[in-house]
Amino acid sequence: MIPIFAYIEHQAGVADDTALELASAARAIDSGATPVAVVTGWGKDLEAVSEALGPSYGEVWKIAHPELAYPNAELVRKALLNVLPRGGVVLAPHTHFGTDLGPGLSIKLNSVFVSDVLAIEGAEGASLKIVRQEFGGQISAQVRCDISTGAVMNIRPGAFKPLEEVRAVGQVVDKSAEAGELTARRRYLETIVAEAADVDITKHQVLVSIGRGIQAEENIEIAEELAEALGGAVSCSRPVVDAKWLPKSRQVGSSGRTVKPRVYLACGISGSFQHMAGVKGSPVIVAINKNPRAPIFQAAEIGIVDDILEFLPELTERIRNPQTEQMTRKHFA
Amino acid sequence: MEILVCVKRVPDTSENEIALNPAGTDIERGDLVYSVNEPDNYAVEEALQIVAKVGGSVTVATVGSADDEEILRREMAMGAKNGVLISDKAFEGSDGKGIATILKTYVQKSQFDLILTGVQAEDGAAQVGGMLAAMLDYPFASLVNSIEVDDSGKLKIGRETAGGNQEMNEIDLPCVLSIQTGINEPRYVGMKGIRQVASVVIPTLGCSELGLAPNTVGEAAAKVKRLNYFVPALGKGAEILKGSREEKIDKLVGLLKTAA
């Protein structure tokens, strides 16, 4: 039985939702697995998280060090290399931190690395089969990994259900003394918090969200008019911000804002998981996209295969002039 | 500063619908439009802006075949001084670690102060940059969205983190950074630029030039292998509206009225 370690992300003394998802992922690798939770940090917050994980994980390895108060992947990697045995599987969430940690950690551990794992289909000896996606989620792939010298795996947040088992006993093992000397050639300075903006998309019930399909800055007006007709606001996905057509404060996604509207119109948005991770609360999602294979059509409730540049203005017109519908019917009745 | 930017030629997701081929063995590649991986292009632009400020030159390199030379030329048309095609039959079928091993060997034969990659390739796993850094024992940072250079031998960099926040770090040179889209505005490459580099020689480096043992890379050495592509059994998915545009709008307006 291969030892499995789950790296736990946490903030303000509370473990991230991914903590229990990793425990499920461990079970998918080996149904009898008793994974060890590994938590790094410093002070009361670390103590709180470590204690809270006991019932779910059975064994929690705590690594406390003042240099680890902020999770700098370069330092966390060093600590893990000093603490973890070789040959095991290390699971970490596929997040801004996990993806920063994983590849380099796999090289130093001399194990394989797998990124953005959606499903684990089973292990046969030293061979593990997993599922991941390519091309922004347009296609899936089965991948086989030789885990004879271990593996580091970044698990897609939300891909596994949180493990709900509760154990009678959970022990916290203090591994801090083994962390070693923690200096690195990359040093954390500070976090610059995202700017507040004139339009707070997190406060709107109806969002007209635009992606690459808007094609040009001057077309954004089409979305603004629809938003106005619906009493909502315009939000967007990454490409629109990269092109500098809208400010970052309008971006929905794991690297942008989290929104909880009642209605989310995804217009010309492909629907990558990073984008959809920012849409919470189960709104009615309507997707309008020229590409019938866009991943957004999996996430949406209603789908329309059409060019937003033609569809949106007509939609706005209908919403503004409901009489038009009746007129048309009268004309051609 | 001598900067290496590792680039990759990929099917352009914004221009293509990615579909399974009829045999179900690969994606349908017949009509695909290929281009330089978008984050890699941002990385080249960033490198060019850095050398414009502090001097030096930019080298673009790719591990691939003759088909991939066109993106090296395009990035040279953008302003990169050198292009290197790293190619050998023995490299075929390499996994991410194999690619990183090949690049490591090239870097060790050269003198680069800074190595950039794009954060992730369309058909990739956001891994080569981090692996390369670990192999070289250089510090690494991913998702870099700002770089400040001075003459201190260190860089001040910003990393994109959750919620639109930016994590500021100081990192020693030499280092490896993976670059996120939106860090800058890549310059336009016109026909004139392309013509100017059309006959520039792009050297090809293979196993023997790099001093690489063939059994350390390629298919045989790969421990992570893609078995197939597939379209997953569609779950619930969206109800795709049928009919004329007018009929779809009718239905949608009705639904929106109920929802809002």
Image: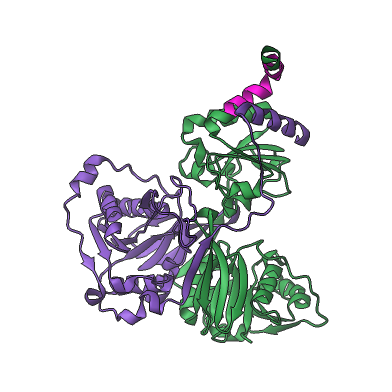
Chain colours: A green, B purple
Q: Is residue B5 above or below residue B138?
A: above
Q: Position of residue A279 (x, y in %)?
A: 66, 48
Q: Is residue A62 above or below residue A163?
A: below
| Position of residue A111 in the picture relative to residue A322 (left or right) | left
| Position of residue A157 in the picture relative to residue B225 (left or right) | right
Query: Is A315 one of the magenta-colored residues?
Result: yes
Q: Residue at x 28, y 50 (%)?
A: B74
Residue occupying the far front of the picture: B23
Secondary structure predominantly adopted by residues drawn in magenta: helix
Q: Which residues are magenta?
A: A312-328
Question: Which sits in the foreground, B252 or B156?
Answer: B252
Give the total number of marks visible in the rendering. 0
Q: Residue at x 69, y 84 (%)?
A: A173
Q: Position of residue A177 (x, y in %)?
A: 61, 86
The answer to which image quadrant residue B217 occupies is: bottom left
Query: Is A166 one of the magenta-colored residues?
Result: no
Question: Which sits in the foreground, B6 or A321?
Answer: A321
Q: Is residue A193 above or below residue B115?
A: above
